[in-house]
C-alpha cells in the first residue's frame, strides 16, 4: 500500500514534502483536507482524523507508511532524505542542509506573522507588510551569500533543504515580484530547481498547487 501524506489543500508546510516526493518518484497518496467557509473556517474534516491518527502529537502534515506515522514537517523530510539519499554525502553537506532547513523555518515564521497578521496576530497587515518588505533584501542577501556559487544548498548535490529553500523563494517572488532580480544566484537556483525533470513534470500536472499558499483567512496567499 502506498504511503499517505495528509495536509490541507494548500501549499503551506506540505508543499516542500510534495515536491520532495515528486522528485524521488515515490508512490504515495494524498489526503487533502478542506477548511470550511468564513467566518468559522471549520477544521472539522481534519479534526475528525486527528483523533484517529493514534500518535500523541497528531498534526498535519503527517506521513503514514504502513505502521510508521510521522508528524512534524522537518521530521518527515529528514526521513525521506535518509530513505532517498537526499541528506548530503559529506558531513559538511549535511550541516549546510540542516542549517538551511532550520533557517527557512525561522524565516517562514516571520513571514507568516505578516501573511496572517489580521486573523491570527490581530495586527495591521499593511504595516507588517511594509516592515517586512524593507527587510526582505537583507534576508535574501543572507541566503544569496550562503548559496554563493554552489548549485544547491549543500554544494554539488541536492538535499532535502533545497525543497525548503525553493518553496520559500517562490513565495517571496509571488509576494514581492522582482525581489530576486538583484540576486542572480537565487534566481538561477529557482530556475534550475524548476528544470529538474521530475519537478517540471509535477509542476505541469493537475496535482500541483500554485495557489493558495495559506488558508482562506490569510491577508496574503489565501
Ligand atoms: N511544527 C509543525 C507545525 C504543524 C502545524 O502547525 N500545522 C498546521 C498547518 S501548517 C495545522 O493546521 N495543524 C493542525 C492542528 O494543529 O491540529 C510542523 O512543522 O509540521
Image (spheres, rainbow, N blue to C red):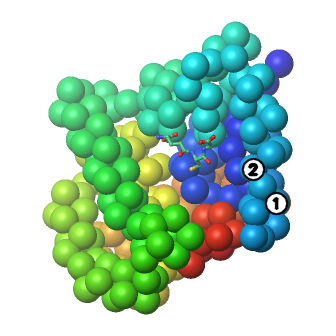
- Secondary element under disc 2, as helix, strand or loop, is loop
- Secondary element under disc 1, as helix, strand or loop, is loop
- Could you tell me if the residues under marks 1 and 2 are in contact, i.e. CB atoms within 8 Å? yes
Residue 180 position by quadrant: bottom left
Q: Answer whether residue 29 is visible to the viewer in this image.
A: no
Which of disc 2 and disc 1 is earlier in sequence?
1
Q: Assess disc 1: are there few (<14), some (14-19) or many (≥20) residues with their C-alpha within 10 Å of its C-alpha.
A: few
Q: Is residue 221 above or below residue 82?
A: below
Give the quadrant of the N terminus.
top right
Residue drawn at point x = 62 percent, y = 28 percent: 58
The tally of labels here is 2
Answer yes or no: disc 2 within 8 Å of ligand 1: yes
Closer to the camera, 146 or 192?
146
Closer to the camera, 133 or 114?
114
| Rendering coords of residue 23 (x, y %) | 59, 43
Residue drawn at point x = 51 percent, y = 38 percent: 73
| Rendering coords of residue 187 (x, y %) | 38, 74
Residue drawn at point x = 74 percent, y = 26 percent: 51
Residue 188 position by quadrant: bottom left
What residue is shown with label 2?
43
Q: Is residue 16 above or below residue 212?
A: above
What residue is shown with label 1?
36
| Rendering coords of residue 203 (x, y %) | 68, 61
Closer to the camera, 34 or 84?
34
Amino acid at each position: 500500500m502506498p504511503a499517505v501524506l495528509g495536509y490541507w489543500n494548500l501549499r503551506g508546510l506540505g508543499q516542500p514534502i510534495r515536491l520532495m516526493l515528486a522528485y524521488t518518484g515515490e508512490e504515495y497518496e494524498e489526503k487533502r483536507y478542506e477548511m470550511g467557509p468564513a467566518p468559522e473556517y471549520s477544521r472539522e474534516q481534519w479534526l475528525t482524523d486527528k483523533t484517529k491518527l493514534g500518535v500523541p502529537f497528531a498534526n498535519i502534515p503527517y506521513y503514514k507508511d504502513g505502521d510508521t506515522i510521522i508528524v512534524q514537517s522537518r521530521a518527515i523530510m529528514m526521513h525521506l532524505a535518509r530513505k532517498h539519499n537526499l541528506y548530503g554525502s559529506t558531513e559538511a553537506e549535511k550541516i549546510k542542509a540542516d542549517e538551511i532547513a532550520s533557517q527557512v523555518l525561522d524565516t517562514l515564521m516571520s513571514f507568516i506573522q505578516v501573511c496572517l497578521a489580521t486573523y491570527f496576530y490581530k495586527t495591521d497587515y499593511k504595516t507588517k507588510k511594509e516592515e517586512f518588505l524593507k527587510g526582505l533584501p537583507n534576508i535574501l542577501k543572507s541566503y544569496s551569500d550562503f548559496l554563493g556559487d554552489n548549485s544547491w544548498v549543500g554544494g554539488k548535490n541536492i538535499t532535502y533543504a533545497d525543497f525548503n529553500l525553493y518553496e520559500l523563494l517562490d513565495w517571496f517572488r509571488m509576494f514581492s515580484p522582482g525581489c530576486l532580480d538583484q540576486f542572480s544566484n537565487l534566481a538561477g537556483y529557482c530556475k534550475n530547481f524548476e528544470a529538474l525533470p521530475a519537478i517540471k513534470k509535477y509542476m505541469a500536472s493537475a496535482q500541483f498547487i500554485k495557489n493558495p499558499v495559506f488558508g482562506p483567512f490569510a491577508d496574503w496567499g489565501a
